[in-house]
Image (cartoon, helix red, strand yellow):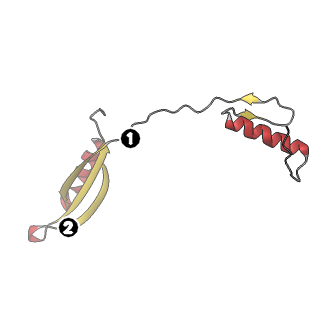
Amino acid sequence: METAIKTNRTPTFLAIGQLAATLVLTGFVAKVALNDEPTAVASPVKVAVQPTQFEYMVDSIPDLEWSTKAQKLGEEGWELVFARRASGDGGNYMYECIFQRQSRVPNI
C-alpha cells in the first residue's frame, strides 16, 4: 500500500528531499552538485581529548622588582592572569599577582 504525501512542491524536489533525509538518517553524507556525481565523505571520528591542565602561582612582587621578575616568570612559561597594586608596610607598594602555566605534570 502506498502512502500519498500532499505537498505543493514539484515531484523532483520531493524525491530529492526524501533521498537527502534517507541519507542523513542512515549516516551517509553525499555531495551533490550540478553535473557532479555524489561523493561519499568520511564520517567524523570521535577522539577523546583531555582538557588542558594548568598550575597556578600567587606571588607578591615589589614595584622596583616588577620588570625583572615578570620577565623571569615569562621565560619559565608563566602567564599573568590577575594583578593588583597593593600597599605594603611602610608605604611600600607591590603587585599581588596570580600566574598560570600549562601543567608540566602528565595527566593520569
Q: Which residue is drawn at 84% across and 43% down?
A: 3
Q: Which amino acid does label 2 sit on?
A: Ala
Residue 102 image point, x, y percent: 32, 41
Given residues 11 and 105, the one toward you in this image is 11
Residue with the mark numbered 2: 86
Give whichever of discs 1 and 2 has the lower sequence position.
Answer: 1
Q: CA–CA distance between discs 1 and 2?
A: 34 Å
56 vs 51, left or right, is left
Q: Which residue is drawn at 27% across and 48% down?
A: 71
Which residue corresponds to the image point at 84% horizontal and 47% vertical from the top-left? 5
- Quadrant where the image shows the N terminus: top right
Which residue lies under the disc numbered 1? 51
Looking at the rendered structure, the secondary structure element under dot 2 is strand
Q: Residue 95 in the image: x percent, y percent?
A: 22, 61
Q: Residue at the spot x=72%, y=35% of the render?
A: 23
Q: Is residue 16 left or right of residue 46?
A: right
Q: Which of marks 1 and 2 is in front?
A: 1
Q: Is mark 1 on a helix, strand or loop?
A: loop
Percent coordinates x, y for residue 100 in the rendering:
29, 48
